[in-house]
Amino acid sequence: MKRALILALLLGAVGAGAQERVAIGAWSIDRTEVTIAQFARYAAATGVLTEAEREGGGFEYEAGWQRRAGWTWRTPDGVPPASAQLPAVHLTHAEAAAYCRWAGGRLPTAAEWLSAAYTEQRSAPPAPWVRGRSYPWPTGDSPAGANTRGPDPWPRAAPAGQTRAGVNGLHDMGANVWEWAADARGGERRTLGGSWWYGPEQMQADVQAWKPAGFYAVYIGFRCAYDADARP
């Protein structure tokens, strides 16, 4: 009953519809990380039950990885979320990829993600952005405005669109939550961008962060990429 009530509340949340996309040449990418509200729409349509739900909860790091009872994409911290616009987390790589397929897209490759995160490609970007310039941070010339463990308004994850828009007008390509990419290394998959748990150093392009494909935690979310012929 509690699970059904939470789902009903999430489906009624503002922003439960289609994700806004940003064109990056011949493909596009979600402007923000996939939210709880958006994943709720997918769950209602497909009846999917995630691994974190089946196993009783996802993971948080505290002197080692700890399973947290009741922590799932619906309730990332074990209680009804303050906003359904928070990123959907506690999802395996396969679960994130399945959502993207349902939405008409796919997980981005690391090369695509890095291009979108650091190189301004809009035809007429607003100041101070410069078309064709590659920046040291997804937020521009400094990591200011990202949701890291440093001083900022968000003690944990921030809702979609609340942090400063960065390169290509994208939000949270640096920090907030790690994002799954399509790249594989044996049984591992690459994650990019860092999270609110870390300082800004994890936001840099040369960070190599790989996680078991079947892992799920409060720090890992995702966004989708779309080929030119993908439905809006």
Image (cartoon, rainbow, N blue to C red):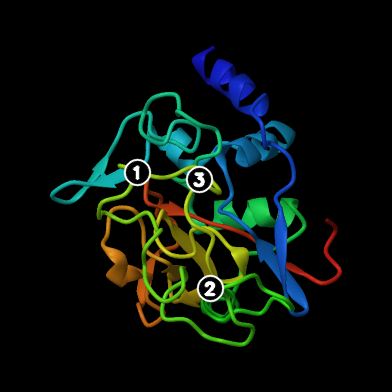
Report the residue at 71% width, 59% height from top: 21
Q: Which of marks 3 and 2 is in front?
A: 2
The circle drawn on residue 137 is none
Q: Which of marks 2 and 1 is in front?
A: 1
Pick whichever of labels 3 and 2 is earlier in the sequence: 3
The circle drawn on residue 117 is 2
Q: Distance between the residues labelled 3 and 2?
A: 18 Å
Q: Nearer the viewer, residue 93 or 125?
A: 125
Q: Identify the secondary structure beneath mark 3.
A: loop
Q: Which of marks 1 and 3 is in front?
A: 1
Residue holding disc 3: 87
Crowd class of label 2 (few under 14; some 14 to 19; many from 20; radius 10 Å): many
The circle drawn on residue 153 is 1
Where's residue 99, x and y in %? 65, 51
For the residues bearing labels 1 and 3, Cβ distance under 8 angstroms = no
Crowd class of label 1 (few under 14; some 14 to 19; many from 20; radius 10 Å): few
Q: How far apart are marks 2 and 1 (CA)?
A: 22 Å
Q: Which of 19 and 45 is in front in this view?
A: 19
Tell me: 151 left or right of 177. Answer: left
Q: Identify the secondary structure beneath mark 2.
A: helix
Crowd class of label 3 (few under 14; some 14 to 19; many from 20; radius 10 Å): many
Q: Quadrant of the N terminus?
A: top right
Report the residue at 57% width, 76% height from top: 129
Q: Residue 94 lies in what quarter of the image?
A: bottom right
For the residues bearing labels 3 and 2, Cβ distance under 8 angstroms = no
